[in-house]
Structure formats: structure tokens, C-alpha cells
């Protein structure tokens, strides 16, 4: 059975503004110095020998996505969305396409904007997930928490032994007191948003749990794989009508919170959700004073400590400061205390 990665690359990434912008979100930027986030995501899938990769993204980012596929040397398809409708619609779109291509397949759904430090361990965990999915289970990868985090959703596992645990429930982002309880209990894992399942199994779950979404997509379900992937003519006009009508629901809420036969595989492979400028510190090597930049030729530090510079076209010098991030991109410059990095979204809203 073919293993097909389905990469979610449609997010706007406003918390990493101004580098991440509407015309070029964070997944198309080189934040680690090792390649764009999408390029790295595709590269992490190659040890599994995928027949191809699928990228689900917005129409405006179709060309950028194709460029990233070409870098990898693997075959790929870009499924463009007329408008964002969250992950349940995006993954059903991809599942319909795969259903037309193969008698059955194994989908690995994962976001394009994560960073993984230990790729070998990540591959080992995914192989375990593939084996579980072959037994018709819905598999998610939970991240072993390293501290009480309020910015992530959690997965609560049932009591059990071994590396694979039945899921009790999915939990929304907690306050700090509850996050401490989750961390100390040892039964809660960060929700990575990485899933593994058979295409046939997830389609049955959609029919049972999200029948309205299935009904909205029914005209597309009558088309061939080539037509489903088309971004022109009648197929594209049809997709616009579908995405105009479907409700924006996450795969977690729409399927995983209510489905049966769900399991979580705890993983510890240096996972980082790159959701703020402060979080980028975890993927960049520091100098002797804990200063960081993916392009050291564009960053100059003097009597500075724990500062980070992300410069798109200019050289940035930081003198006598500590604990700040400086971002230069397009026509914008952001200077922010690292501890206030979650407030970047507010700046974007003010500018809009």
C-alpha cells in the first residue's frame, strides 16, 4: 500500500510577521538556514519512500509550492483551495483525490511549518504509525511535553503500557495552572497535528461524523483525479462553490475528538511548532552571547545578548541590547521583546 504525505501549507503565519506575509507565508521561508520549512518537511518524508507528495495550499501559493516539490526530486501534486476552510475540508479534499488515484493508500497528514531535530527518530515513529494504520486505526503523534505549555492543545491518553496508547480525549489550550497539571500527570501529550490513517478509513469517518461536508463535496467526488487536481475551468468553479459553502472545522474537532479506534504514539524527536519569533531560538545555533541569525552575514551584534536577527535584504546591527528580535522584510521592520512575541498578531491587526 502506497504511503502518501499530505502536507498542509495553507496557513498565513501572521505571528511571524513581517517575514511571513500574505504573499509569502512562513512555510516558504528559510528560518533554520537549512532550507524553507516546506522544503524541510518534504525532505523528512523521503526515507519513507513516498510514491508522491500532496501539498494542500491556497491558490496564490500554488507556484511556490510547486517550486518546493521540484527541489525534492519526488513527484507531487498541489491541491489548491479557493479559500481557507480549516483542516477537515483540506484533508477531505486530499482524501478524495487519493481515492481516485489508488485502490487504497496510507495518508500521513502533517503541517508544513514544524521543525524536527531528530529525523531518524521521527521516521521510526511514523513507521510505527503506518503499521497501526494498516489495522484500521486513526493514529496521531503526541509530543512528550518538556514543560507546561499554554500555547498548544493536548491529547490525554488512557492508561496503558507500551509505545501506543488509546486516546481518552483531546483538550484545548489550557491556562498555566492546568498546563502544570497536565505536565506533571504524565498522561497528556502536546497535539502535534500529525496524523496517519488509511484513506478508506478516514473517508468512512467523514461519512459518519461530517455528513454535511461530504454532501457539499459530492460533485467533486464524481470527478477523476485529474479533474479534482485541476485549477482551471469547470473543476475550479465547482471547487469555489464548495469552499464557499462548507463550514470551517478542524480535523481534531470534526473527526478525531469523536471517532473510535483512535491511538496516540508519544514522540520525542526535538519537535518545535514555529509559532512565534521566540520559538525560532530553538532551531538556530547561538553564538557565545546567545545571539542568533539564519544568515550571519546580515547580522552584527555588539555588546548584545540573547538577540535574534532575521533580515531579508539589509544588514542589521544590534548594539547594547538584550532579549530582542529584529525582523526586516519587505517594507517593514519589527523590533520586539522576545517575551512579547505572541503580541505580533495584534500589530498585524492594527496595520490592517
Image (cartoon, rainbow, N blue to C red):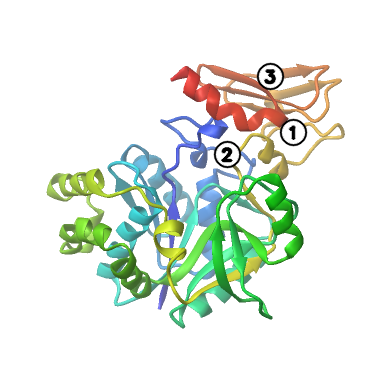
Proximity of marks 2 and 3: CB atoms separated by less than 8 Å: no
Left or right of 71? Residue 200 is: left
Left or right of 283? Residue 109 is: left
Name the element at disc 1: loop
Q: Earlier in the sequence, mark 2 or mark 1?
A: 2
Name the element at disc 2: loop
Left or right of 88? Residue 241 is: left
> x, y percentage for residue 153?
58, 53
Q: CA distance from mark 2 to mark 1?
A: 14 Å
Q: How many labels sit on residues?
A: 3
Q: Earlier in the sequence, mark 2 or mark 3?
A: 2
Q: Which residue is mark 2?
A: 30
Asked if residue 120 can be seen in this view, the reply is no
On residue 316, the disc is: 3
| Depth check, front residue: 2 or 326 | 326
Q: Farthest residue in the left direction? A: 234
Quarter that holds the N terminus: bottom left
> x, y percentage for residue 136?
43, 80
Name the element at disc 3: strand
Asked if residue 2 can be seen in this view, the reply is yes
| Depth check, front residue: 95 or 213 | 213
Q: Farthest residue in the front direction? A: 177
Q: Earlier in the sequence, mark 1 or mark 3?
A: 1
Q: CA distance from mark 2 to mark 3?
A: 17 Å
Left or right of 63? Residue 68 is: right
Q: Which residue is mark 1?
A: 292
Amino acid at each position: 500500500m502506497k504511503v502518501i504525505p499530505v502536507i498542509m501549507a495553507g496557513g498565513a503565519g501572521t505571528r511571524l510577521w513581517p517575514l511571513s506575509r500574505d504573499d509569502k507565508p512562513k512555510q516558504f521561508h528559510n528560518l533554520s538556514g537549512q532550507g524553507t520549512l516546506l522544503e524541510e518537511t518534504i525532505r523528512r518524508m523521503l526515507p519513507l519512500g513516498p510514491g508522491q507528495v500532496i501539498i494542500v495550499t491556497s491558490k496564490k501559493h500554488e507556484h511556490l509550492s510547486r517550486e518546493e516539490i521540484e527541489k525534492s526530486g519526488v513527484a507531487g501534486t498541489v491541491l489548491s483551495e479557493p479559500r481557507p476552510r480549516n483542516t477537515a475540508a483540506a484533508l477531505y479534499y486530499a482524501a478524495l483525490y487519493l481515492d481516485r488515484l489508488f485502490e487504497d493508500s496510507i495518508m500521513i497528514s502533517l503541517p508544513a511549518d514544524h521543525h524536527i531535530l531528530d529525523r531518524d527518530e521521527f521516521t521510526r515513529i511514523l513507521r510505527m504509525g503506518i503499521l497501526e494504520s494498516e489495522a484500521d486505526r486513526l493514529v496521531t503523534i503526541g509530543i512528550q511535553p518538556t514543560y507546561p505549555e499554554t500555547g498548544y492543545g493536548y491529547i490525554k491518553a488512557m492508561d496503558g503500557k507500551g509505545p501506543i496508547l488509546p486516546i481518552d480525549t483531546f483538550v484545548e489550550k489550557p491556562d498555566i495552572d492546568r498546563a502544570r497539571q497536565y505536565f506533571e500527570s504524565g498522561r497528556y501529550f502536546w497535539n502535534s497535528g500529525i496524523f496517519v490513517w488509511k484513506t478508506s478509513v478516514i473517508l468512512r469517518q467523514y461519512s459518519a461524523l461530517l455528513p454535511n461536508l461530504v454532501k457539499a463535496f459530492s460533485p467533486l467526488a464524481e470527478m477523476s483525479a485529474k479533474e479534482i487536481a485541476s485549477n482551471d475551468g469547470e473543476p475550479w468553479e465547482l471547487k469555489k462553490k464548495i469552499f464557499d459553502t462548507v463550514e470551517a472545522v478542524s480535523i481534531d474537532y470534526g473527526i478525531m475528538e469523536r471517532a473510535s479506534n483512535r491511538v496516540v504514539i508519544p514522540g520525542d524527536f526535538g519537535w518545535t511548532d514555529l509559532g512565534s519569533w521566540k520559538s525560532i531560538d530553538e532551531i538556530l545555533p547561538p553564538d557565545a552571547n546567545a545571539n542568533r541569525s539564519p544568515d550571519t552575514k546580515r547580522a552584527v551584534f555588539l555588546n548584545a545578548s540573547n538577540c535574534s536577527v532575521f533580515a531579508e535584504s539589509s544588514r542589521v546591527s544590534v548594539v547594547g541590547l538584550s532579549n530582542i528580535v529584529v525582523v526586516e522584510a519587505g517594507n517593514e521592520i519589527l523590533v520586539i521583546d522576545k517575551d512579547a512575541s505572541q503580541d505580533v498578531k495584534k500589530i498585524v491587526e492594527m496595520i490592517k
